[in-house]
Amino acid sequence: MSPIEVPADSPFGLDNLPYGVFSTPGAPARVGVRLADTVVDLTALPLGDDAAEAFGQPTLNAFLARGPRRWADIRARLRDLLAAGDIPPGATHPVADVTMHLPVQVGDFADFYASEHHAANVGRIFRPDSPPLPPNWKHLPVAYHGRAGTVVVSGTDIVRPRGQRRPRGERAPGHGPTLRLDFEAELAFVVGAGSPLGEPVGVDEFDARVFGAVLLNDWSARDLQDWESRPLGPFQGKSFATSVSAWVVPMAALRAARVPLPPQDPPPLPYLRGRAPDWRPWGLDVDLAVTWNGEVVARPNARDLYWSPDQLLAQLTANGAATRPGDLFASGTLSGPDRHQRACLLELTWNGTEPVTVNGERRLFLEDGDELAISATAVGEAGGRVGFGTVAGRVRPARP
Ligand code: CA
């Protein structure tokens, strides 16, 4: 048994150890962790009596349900085993040789709107004669409920959706393939131990409830969304597909990435604040790169959010809504203050009026055959980087 070789600059070192679901030819999907470019099969490691059951499954949900004490035990044990190189033969597979699957069975999916830069840009684009932010925006984290059943793992092709839309300058709507297909670069949080119906989860309970984070692309058909969202929120403009990265980075690996957010003004209501006097809203120093057909077109960072992830969970459950292991809640488009930090094409092209140059071509929205990939790293405990990997998808033509 020899240790897995981990280059010093690997974003998948011992301070990361993200979880995913993988399969190899002829064997069922099961849970693994990634160390450097190796997937370690957790069903083959001595991790306790309940491990074979929890990890011999095609989703992380059973492990998530075990709760924070068990997550911490397993993480500590894994670090010891992997550091010692104490891994049975046959328990490791090169990342390039495995197929990755959707890591969790998603129960519910809610998508917030937590970047002030994004919300204000959208306001300026669609309501140029009004204040950029709606009056509720600084009082509560605004969200919509997405479609859990169409959350797909990175690498899944995205078929251009058809829907009803009214092209500019026309009086009557038509039905057909979207003409304005967009992406939204986001971070999403994976609920671990759920919470019962009727019991709000306070801001202080985030660490006990949330297991980890993934990258998320909230694919958006802007013309469908624009026509249908009056007066209710997004529906078919977004429910055709939402992509997530295959590796769930544990929140325990993101402790060094936590950064304080600027004070919120006006101060949020008490249910959106921690109980400790020194509680402050926090963000995550997660540096994202959005790549369109191989060219980087945006560099947002999750530290530019207005609302803190613990406030998002508090808002999600403030009315007593239950949560379950595997539920996802996302940040919303992670746009920052600068032009190159705009995290969707709606903003990057200012609603299709300012083309973006991609490989020498002037482009407005996504075309068939395009590949959109979002990758990210965060600050790690040991001073290195913690990788999220990539969430990627290629656009396929609409079905006839
Ligand atoms: Ca979104």
Image (cartoon, rainbow, N blue to C red):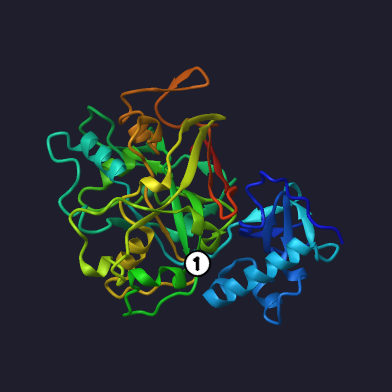
Q: Is residue 87 above or below residue 332?
A: below
- Picture residue at 36% right of the left edge, 45% below the top: 304
- Picture residue at 31% right of the left edge, 71% below the top: 276
Left or right relative to 172: residue 34? right
Query: In the structure shown, which secondary structural element does the residue marked by tag 1 occupy?
Result: loop
User: Camera-side residue: 349 or 91?
Assistant: 91
Q: Is residue 218 visible?
A: no
Give x and y (percent) for residue 352.
33, 28
Residue at mark 1: 326
Disc 1 marks a residue whose amino acid type is Gly
Q: Is residue 206 visible?
A: yes
Where is residue 126, by image quadrant? top left
Disc tally is: 1
Among all residues in the image, which is located at the extreme top?
360
Give x and y (percent) for residue 73.
62, 74
- Picture residue at 68% right of the left edge, 62% below the top: 32
Image quarter where the N terminus lies is bottom right
User: Camera-side residue: 161 or 352?
Assistant: 352
Give x and y (percent) for residue 360.
50, 17
User: Camera-side residue: 220 or 189?
Assistant: 189
Q: Is residue 134 above or below residue 83?
A: above
Q: Is mark 1 within 8 Å of ligand 1?
A: no
Left or right relative to 24: residue 10? left
Among all residues in the image, which is located at the extreme bottom?
49
Left or right relative to 120: residue 73? right
Give x and y (percent) for residue 155.
60, 45
Left or right relative to 83: residue 320? left
User: Camera-side residue: 382 or 167?
Assistant: 382
Among all residues in the image, which is located at the extreme left?
129
Q: Could you classify mark 1 by the number of other residues whose Cα lies within 10 Å: few (under 14), some (14-19), or many (20 or more)?
A: many
